[in-house]
Amino acid sequence: PNVIETRQIRKAYSMGDNVIWALKGVDVSIKAGEFVAVMGTSGSGKSTFMNMIGCLDTPSDGKILLNGEDVSHLDAAALAHIRNRYIGFVFQQFNLLPRTSALDNVALPLLYSEVPEREWQPRAKASLEQVGLGERLHNQPSQLSGGQQQRVAIARALVNNPLLILADEPTGALDTRTSFEIMALFQQLNDAGKTIVLVTHEPEIAAVAKRKLVFRDGELVEDYLNGHH
Ligand code: ADP
Ligand code: ADP
């Protein structure tokens, strides 16, 4: 099955007496091994789309299948379980725990998993090695550069071996050079088979992905492979 398949998803938000349709019928299929950039102006529906495919929220109507399983009607507890098991999240501001080592930050998702405790540290270490931070296991976020902190966050997203990595403006807080280092890391993870979906405002960043989705006013208006536009 596709890792993600959305069928005519729509999402309404109520603002007093008004209803805003943040998504107006979106069909997207994302296969295993894809590397997708999501673009669009502010208010176009990117975050709403990411929240839907990240199982943070459910659509008002339409269907979302995650690895073939319908997740469109699950309750909050079931969604939390699906997120923890199948999805790795990366954020613009890294969202690491301060005064906590890289190793413990990365091990955090394992606390809520079925992975036995004796495997937490070895798994977290392997994940940090995968992002090139094998020498920084015991450093706290304040002792690391922005790029290194984002690598820790990516290691945390990988530690559960998720089906899907979702990144919301992962280079938004980084300088240009570091942004491209982080994109090179995503590219390397994608080459190794990881499915990645990221939001960015920057065409140069989006160009690193293989496929681009562009939202406008709640609709998917472009969907194409980079280099084929
Ligand atoms: P983007 O991420 O592209 O900036 P969003 O998905 O955040 O777009 O927003 C799409 C539309 O939905 C916008 O009009 C926004 O104001 C509205 N919206 C988003 N979240 C909410 C919310 N929680 N309550 C009300 N309106 C919302
Ligand atoms: P320079 O490297 O020329 O100093 P930057 O790349 O640091 O310029 O970008 C300047 C501004 O753009 C900063 O405020 C930075 O946070 C922001 N910025 C950089 N990269 C991104 C990105 N990928 N997405 C959103 N904002 C970004």
Image (spheres, rainbow, N blue to C red):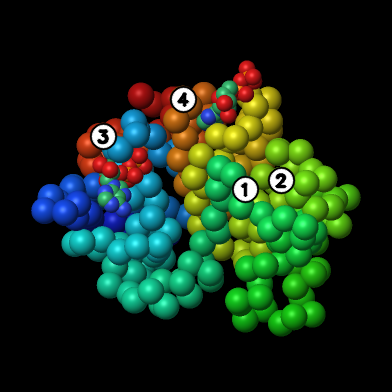
- Residue 19 horizontal side relative to residue 72, left or right: left
Nearest the viewer among 161 and 229 is 161
Separation of marks 2 and 1 at Cα, in angstroms: 7 Å
Image region (quadrant) for ligand 1:
top left
Q: Amino acid at mark 1?
A: Phe
Separation of marks 1 and 3 at Cα, in angstroms: 27 Å
Q: Position of residue 25 (x, y in %)?
A: 19, 50
Label of residue 216 in the image: 3
- Quickly name the residue at label 2: 149
Separation of marks 2 and 3 at Cα, in angstroms: 32 Å
Q: Amino acid at mark 4?
A: Pro
Q: Residue at x 39, y 51 (%)?
A: 50
Q: Position of residue 80 (x, y in %)?
A: 46, 72
Q: Position of residue 10 (x, y in %)?
A: 20, 54
Label of residue 94 in the image: 1
- Residue 99 horizontal side relative to residue 160, left or right: right
Separation of marks 3 and 4 at Cα, in angstroms: 16 Å
Proximity of marks 2 and 1: CB atoms separated by less than 8 Å: yes
Vertical side of 45 occupied by 5: above or below: below
Residue at the extreme front of the image, as rendered? 16
Q: Residue at x 65, y 27 (%)?
A: 175
Count residues near mark 1 (Cα–Cα under 10 Å), then give few for <14, some for 14-19, many for 20+.
Answer: many
